[in-house]
Amino acid sequence: MLTIEKNLKTYLDLMKDAFKIDDRGAFVLPFELRLKDQEFLKYCHLDVDWNVPSISDEDLPDEFCQKVVNLVDLFRRKTVHLPYECMLFFDYKTGEIIYCFVEDNLDGRITKEIYEIYFEGKNVASIHNHPKGFLSAPSGKNFQILEMENEDYELICGYDEFWILEANGVFEKEIVEEIRGKAKLFYFHSIHFKNDESKVYGDSLLKYINNKVKNNIKLTKVRYH
């Protein structure tokens, strides 16, 4: 029993240190994550670069609370130089973090399974980074929001651009596959434009989503200040 209590105290001390580091983000975690989410501890201890351009409340949807504005801005500053992906799922009205993934492995891509039962009764958004050298705009795989009942926003921090994908409800499989297929075609088209691949791909995807897809979906691009 003493060993268990000692281990519990150690975990709580670690979390206190983590909250000191990320106090500006004012994170709120579900209790079940506080003692076992090692990836969140990794995220908390990532270096913060205060010199990178900020993300403000003007860049984000009006529904996002101030805690989430701080969370998103801090995420950008923590992940801008990383060679691998990180991802947070959070409640955009309270700032509560639901999931945290840090893929500091050889592949560097997020492949974890997500259980939507933890999204019930919450206002869910996600954010992840695209490391430098990757396309800034959402890839075909990033449209998982269309397959999730309770996720309303998907935010992507590219190296020089910030993207907001908004969609409500679950979309028919045919629509999701069509969008992913178009994204793949836009990518193969963009590689013919040397040094401009990211811009060509992003602009093509932006026009297609907002002008051609006749569903409840919206894509927004924000340049960093």
Image: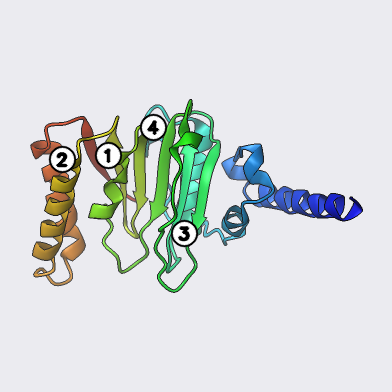
> Disc 3 designates what residue?
79
Left or right of residue 178, residue 149 in this image: right
Q: CA distance from mark 3 to mark 1?
A: 25 Å
Nearest to N terminus: mark 3 or mark 4: 3
Front of the two marks 3 and 2: 2
Q: Which residue is mark 4?
A: 150
Q: Amino acid at mark 3?
A: Thr
Residue 58 occupies quadrant? top left
Viewed as shown, does residue 223 lie left or right of 186? right
User: Which circle marks residue 146 in the picture?
Assistant: 1
Q: Is residue 3 visible?
A: yes
What amino acid type should be assigned to the residue bearing mark 1? Leu
Residue 82: horizontal and vertical position, in percent?
45, 66
Q: Quote the CA–CA distance across marks 3 and 2.
A: 32 Å
Q: Nearer the viewer, mark 3 or mark 1?
A: 1
Residue assigned mark 2? 175
| Distance from Cα at disc 1 to Cα at disc 4 | 10 Å
**Above or below 157: residue 63:** above
